[in-house]
Image: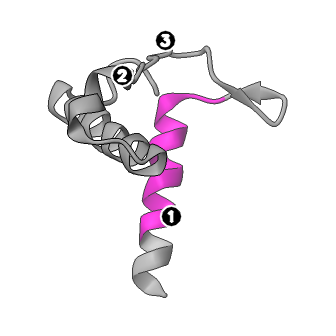
């Protein structure tokens, strides 16, 4: 994810949700949660690329907004 794009609260939620998914998929219990490690990699602006070019955080935000609007209009 882009560096600074997600708050610590949202990162904590991501870790919690990812852990629950892995535990469920592996048939493990909450007692096994310490066996699940979630690594969040934040990438500095200008280090993302797609379709042969650099993708900026503002472009990702605009694409996400367009996607939300398209879903709302459907």
Q: Which residue was labeled with disc 2? A: 35
In the displayed structure, 7 sits above or below 41; it is: below
Q: Around disc 1, counting alpha carbons within 10 Å, would you say few (fewer than 14), some (14 to 19), or many (20 or more)?
A: few
Q: Around disc 2, counting alpha carbons within 10 Å, would you say few (fewer than 14), some (14 to 19), or many (20 or more)?
A: few
Q: Is residue 63 left or right of residue 39?
A: right
Q: Magenta stretch: residue 57 in it?
A: yes
Depth check, front residue: 62 or 36: 36
Farthest-out residue, left? 9
x 84%, y 29%: residue: 52
Q: Is residue 55 left or right of residue 66?
A: right
Q: Is residue 63 left or right of residue 22?
A: right
- Helix, strand or loop at disc 1? helix
Q: Which residue was labeled with disc 1? A: 67
Label of residue 44 in the image = 3
x 31%, y 44%: residue: 20
Q: Position of residue 54 (x, y in %)?
A: 70, 24
Q: Position of residue 6 (x, y in %)?
A: 29, 30
The answer for how far apart the CA atoms under marks 2 and 1 are is 35 Å
The answer for how far apart the CA atoms under marks 2 and 3 are is 29 Å
Disc on the earlier residue, 3 or 1: 3
- Helix, strand or loop at disc 3? loop
């Amino acid at each position: 994810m882009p560096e600074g794009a997600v708050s610590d609260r949202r990162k904590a939620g991501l870790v919690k949700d990812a852990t629950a998914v892995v535990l469920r998929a592996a048939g493990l219990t909450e007692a096994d949660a310490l066996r699940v490690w979630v690594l969040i990699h934040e990438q500095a602006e200008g280090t993302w690329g797609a379709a042969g070019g650099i993708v900026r955080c503002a472009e990702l935000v605009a694409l996400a907004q367009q996607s939300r609007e398209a879903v709302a209009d459907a």
